[in-house]
Image (cartoon, rainbow, N blue to C red):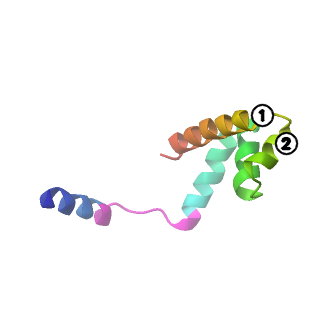
Amino acid sequence: MLDFQKKELELEITEPKQSDSEQIDNLEIQLRRLDTDTRELIMLRFYSELSFKEIAAMRSEPIGTTLAKLHRGLKKLRELMR
């Protein structure tokens, strides 16, 4: 167990990490690759900091639909960010 943790730590140290600005640039690029509807949901939630209820009301859709779309969109964004 300790050997495994040691190897994990060594990997973390030796792998180059992206700088904050590189991560932000990559995020912007990947956001543009999403469809317009998904990008809008993510922007409203995380950049405009609107609640799920506010977004659902704005889009005239049930809150469950908004949550499901946002969940799928974030999953897709995570895949693109790899």
Q: Is residue 26 above or below residue 39?
A: below
Residue marked by disc 1: 62
Q: For the point 81% across and 33% down, which residue is it? A: 61
Q: What residue is shown at x 73% (from left), y 47% (from top)?
A: 52
The answer to which image quadrant residue 41 occupies is: top right
What residue is rendered at 85% in x and 42% in y?
Answer: 57
Query: Judging from the image, what secondary structure is the residue with disc 2 in?
Result: helix
User: Which numbered disc, 1 or 2, marks the residue that appears first in the sequence?
Assistant: 2
Residue drawn at point x = 61 percent, y = 57 percent? 25
User: Does the segment drawn in magenta span residue 19?
Assistant: yes
Q: Is residue 36 visible?
A: yes
- Please check the rendered image and state whether residue 39 is part of the magenta-colored stretch, yes or no: no
Say above or below: 29 vs 73: below
Q: What stretch is highlighted in magenta?
A: 12-21
Q: Are marks 1 and 2 in contact (CB under 8 Å)?
A: no
| Amino acid type, callout 1 | Pro
Could you say whether the residue bearing mark 1 is in a helix, strand or loop?
Answer: loop
* Mark 2 nearby-residue class (10 Å; few <14, some 14–19, many ≥20): few
* Whether residue 34 can be seen here: no
Where residue 2 sits, quadrant-wise, is bottom left
Q: Mark 2 — residue?
A: 57
Q: Which of 25 and 10 is in front in this view?
A: 10
Q: Residues within 10 Å of mark 1 (few under 14, many from 20)?
A: few
Q: Position of residue 74 (x, y in %)?
A: 60, 43
Tell me the kind of residue under disc 2: Ala
CA gap, disc 1 and disc 2: 8 Å
Q: Where is residue 75 in the image (x, y as percent from the top left)?
A: 55, 39
